[in-house]
Amino acid sequence: MSTDFKVKVNDTFDFDFTKESILQLDAISIESTKFHILHQGLPYRAEIISSYFNQKNYTVKVNNSTYHVAILNPLDTLIKEMGFDVGTTKQVNVIKAPMPGLILEISVVVGQTVKESDNLLILTAMKMENSFLSPRDGVIKNIAICVGDSVVKGDLLIEFEH
């Protein structure tokens, strides 16, 4: 399997990169999401506006222009060539208790729009606090528990709108 990466920008432009060409990129990190880049003697300011690491999708701003970038690694490319959709999974619509415990904190309300990885609630079990992060972007449809409630494995905690 090669070390080539396929990059699609704004669902329109396709680029191929090798690991070596990426390592030769003249980029300096200014902050965690901001970079100074030199390309063919010209300077560019780049900033990662949003990143969905698991889906390999990013929104990047370069010199005041915004781009949507999708990256496919060699495995993603092979899966696509085999006729499967990359990144398609069953959409999670409910969060259930994976173990018995006590609801310590609820960080969302019904009707709230959440992003993937936003904190939803904290369940304490066996003297450990377990944070539940949103598995996807969505809107909270129902919260079936309250702070202080005891839950058993399999109890419905939070439901998303479809």
Image (tube, grey):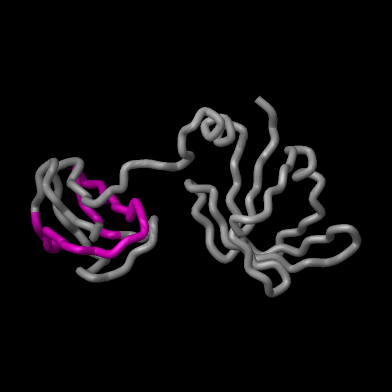
Q: Is residue 37 left or right of residue 67?
A: right
Q: Which residue is pictured at 13% across the width and 41% down the height? A: 153
Q: Which residue is pictured at 29% across the width and 52% down the height? A: 132
Q: On screen, 79 above or below 144? A: above
Q: Magenta span has 131?
A: yes
Q: Which residues are magenta?
A: 120-149
Whole-percent x, y for residue 107 in the image:
26, 65
Q: Main secondary structure of the magenta part?
A: strand
In this rendered view, identify the residue nearer to me: 105 or 47: 47
Q: Is residue 63 left or right of residue 113?
A: right
Q: On screen, 20 above or below 108? A: above
Q: How many marks?
A: 0
In this rendered view, identify the residue nearer to me: 34 or 40: 40
Whole-percent x, y for residue 94 in the image:
21, 51
Q: Quadrant of the N terminus?
A: top right
Whole-percent x, y for residue 23 in the image:
77, 43
Q: On screen, 1 above or below 57? A: above
Q: Which residue is pictured at 78% across the width and 61% down the height? A: 37
Q: Magenta span has 162?
A: no
Give the farthest residue toward the right.
41
